[in-house]
Amino acid sequence: MILVTGGTGLVGSHLLFQLLKSNEPIRAIYRSKKTLARVKHVFSYFSDDADTLFNSIEWVEADLNNIPQLQHAFKGITHVYHCAAMVSFEPDKFRLIRKINIKGTANIVNLSISHQVKKLCYVSSISAIGHHIDPEKLIDERTEWNQEDDNSVYAITKFGAELEVWRGTQEGLDAVIVNPGVILGAGFWNGANSGSIFKRIYNGFPYYTKGATGYVDVWDVVSVMQQLMNSTIKNESYILVSENLNFKTFLTQTAEALHVKPPSKEAKPWLLAVFWRLDRLQNIFLRKRRRLSKQASKTAISVTKYDASKLKNTLNFKFKPIRKSINEVSQLFLNDL
């Protein structure tokens, strides 16, 4: 039986839809019943029988740090897709993010070992990979993480979670790690998910920055995960990036697909510096949630380009063009309005 953690998230819900095609028994973890509706909604994009598909999954309520609940979820499991994580860049939430992303992953690794799971696939992030001083030099799996950098709390916890997976491989667990770029997929238009970008652009997003990063379609992510799990490959990590785009290009293409005005004002570094400081003051004195951290403002103006050659050569994989992904996700967003 296959276990999927984070089954109600962007990657998890699309992965479940993909896995159902294999006709293998699937168990998925959820934390709150109210999140289950999102999975049905994603299924409804691609099937007229979403309820039947949803009900063919064995759903188990469990918290990543509740060992008795996890023990129950792991009964009879042979393969684990660990997609669950807290996506947040709010520095004041570091302890919570660390508890979920690092300690939670440690629990999944430990239970995978004790239940003699055959293989684990962990969904990490490109944020857990190091950067080069030269922005034009491509980042690959060999680029070393620098703990002295001013890394975001999310990046720190994803890197820490990877260390837990690698520790598991030293204790006999077969595992693979995927490091996706910004994942483009439908159904999650709020919160810290990448889908919220589409909503913000549709509602009017006048600013752009001169930064750049890597993007990938959610279907490419889940397809690679399944292929790696069904292969003899073990104890390897792979960057999943279709294209490196500057933020202005991505925002413009998305605005065009949504039939709204593209951004036309550059947010200069000095302006971002003012914004994140004001945001911090509002957090301290007014108890408002952080919307822009120092690290996020730095990312917005940083150029980071990624090389996915290792994955392409290993699986002979061809990524979906990002413009096509933007168009598909934008159409589903418009359909949801």
Image (tube, rainbow, N blue to C red):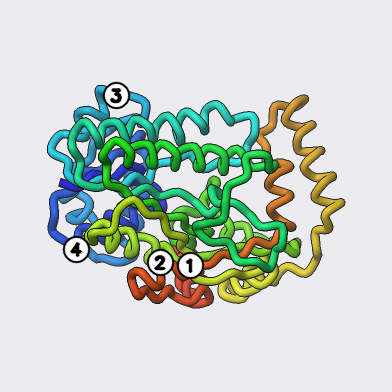
Question: How many marks are shown on the rendered structure?
Answer: 4
CA separation in Å, label 2 and label 3: 34 Å
**Is any atom of residue 334 visible in this view?**
no
Circles 3 and 1: CB distance less than 8 Å? no
Q: Is residue 310 above or below residue 83?
A: below
> On the picture, is 288 further left or further right than 309?
right
- Of the numbered discs 1 and 4, the one sitting upstream in the chain is 4
Neighbourhood count class around disc 4 (C-alpha, 10 Å): few under 14, some 14–19, many 20 upward: few
Mark closer to the observer (1, 4): 1
From the viewer's side, name the closer residue of 172 and 193: 172
Depth check, mark 3 against mark 4: the one in front is 3
Left/right placement of residue 95 relative to residue 313 reads right
The residues bearing labels 3 and 1 have C-alpha atoms spaced at a distance of 36 Å
Question: Residue 213's quadrant in the figure?
Answer: bottom right
The residue at which mark 3 appears reads as 67
Picture residue at 48% right of the left edge, 62% below the top: 184
Q: Residue 234 at x, y = what percent?
A: 30, 53
> Where does label 1 land, which residue?
308
Q: Where is residue 68 in the image (x, y as percent from the top left)?
A: 25, 22
Residue for badge 4: 21
For mark 2, does the 10 Å Cα neighbourhood hold few (<14), some (14 to 19), or many (20 or more) residues? some
Give how far across and how far down residue 66 sits, in percent.
33, 24
Q: CB under 8 Å between callouts 2 and 1?
A: yes
The residue singled out by tag 2 in the image is 311
**Which of disc 3 and disc 2 is earlier in sequence?**
3
